[in-house]
Amino acid sequence: MPDVYVYDKLPLPLRVQIVHIIKDAFGEDGRHTNKASDAYEFVKQTLCREFGVFELVQYPKSNQESVFNFFLEEESVEHALDVVELCFKYIQLVIPEDRSYLLNTRRKIEPDDAVAELNERFKEHGVGYQFESGEIIRVDSQFLHAEAVKPTLAVLRDENFKGANEEFLKAHEHYRHGRYKECLVDALKAFESTMKTICSLRGWPTQPTDTAKNLIAACMSNGLFPAYFDSQFSSIRSLLESGVPAVRNKNGGHGQGAVLVAVPEYLARYTLNLTATTILFMVEAHQATM
């Protein structure tokens, strides 16, 4: 598999393969249902509203043709990825919950298999995106993604961490669209929400206005980490306090004054990866000491 990914191109063979996956996952209408047709109509209407147009392409013969022709011809990678994200959200979140869809539509591939094939096709073509937790996530390092981002998304799927999960995914969305200041802000929100949730689950008192520093202190003083960490107490606390909160505060969290503060991509990427490893560390510590 490639070690270096591209982000500004979706090769035509990849687009064609994605069309095949969507067709197989949406399926074809049965004798007594229009579920597949409804799916294509939903995707088309949602994209038209999002892009501010009445039609995706001129003179389409069907909603399916409209969606696929637009996807195959669209020059903007961001708009093309929007099509992929919306279709696979429907495949992963809507189809499995619709019993009539599952029973009455002729499908060639199950939703989980469709998502797995999509992600394999991205890797096969060296395109740096993956579909995770209902979102298109940018992948900068396959190792970091596998060892930090994916496990973090897995632990945040717990209903208790719903807020942190939403903010962590939002940070990734900002990163994919080049909104690096917003990425830093939501990364810290996810970090703080994780700690607030842990404190709430354990009955440790906190205030709605508590900063990351106060929340870290609450976790440390209430024994979130094993007793043998006592000798490293100051080092761990310093590491947590000087990580995500410090980066955010200096680059995206306060007024920038007379001089515009430009947050570089590498700093946003570092913050996202640091947020992932820190959240994973704290949630696993919480789970291990329950």
Image (cartoon, rainbow, N blue to C red):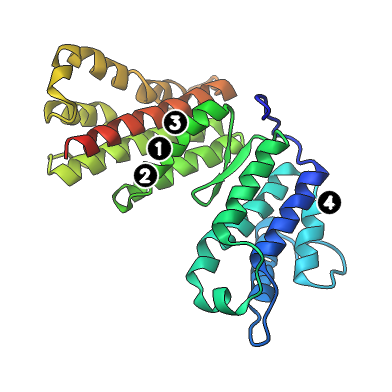
> Distance between the Cα atoms at labels 4 and 3?
35 Å
> Distance between the Cα atoms at labels 1 and 4?
35 Å
Query: In the image, what residue type sits under mark 4?
Result: Glu
Tell me: residue 275, above or below residue 208: above
Q: Which residue is mark 4?
A: 73
**146 sits to left or right of 65:** left
Residue neighbourhood size for the residue with mark 4, other residues' Cα within 10 Å, grouped as few (<14), some (14–19), many (≥20): few
Q: Quadrant of residue 14?
A: top right
Residue contact between numbered discs 4 and 3, judged by CB atoms under 8 Å: no
Q: Which residue is mark 3?
A: 148
Q: Which residue is mark 2?
A: 156
Tell me: residue 109, above or below residue 4: below
> Distance between the Cα atoms at labels 2 and 3?
12 Å
Residue at left offset 24%, top offset 12%: 235
**226 sits to left or right of 33:** left
Numbered circle sitting on residue 152: 1
Residue contact between numbered discs 1 and 4, judged by CB atoms under 8 Å: no
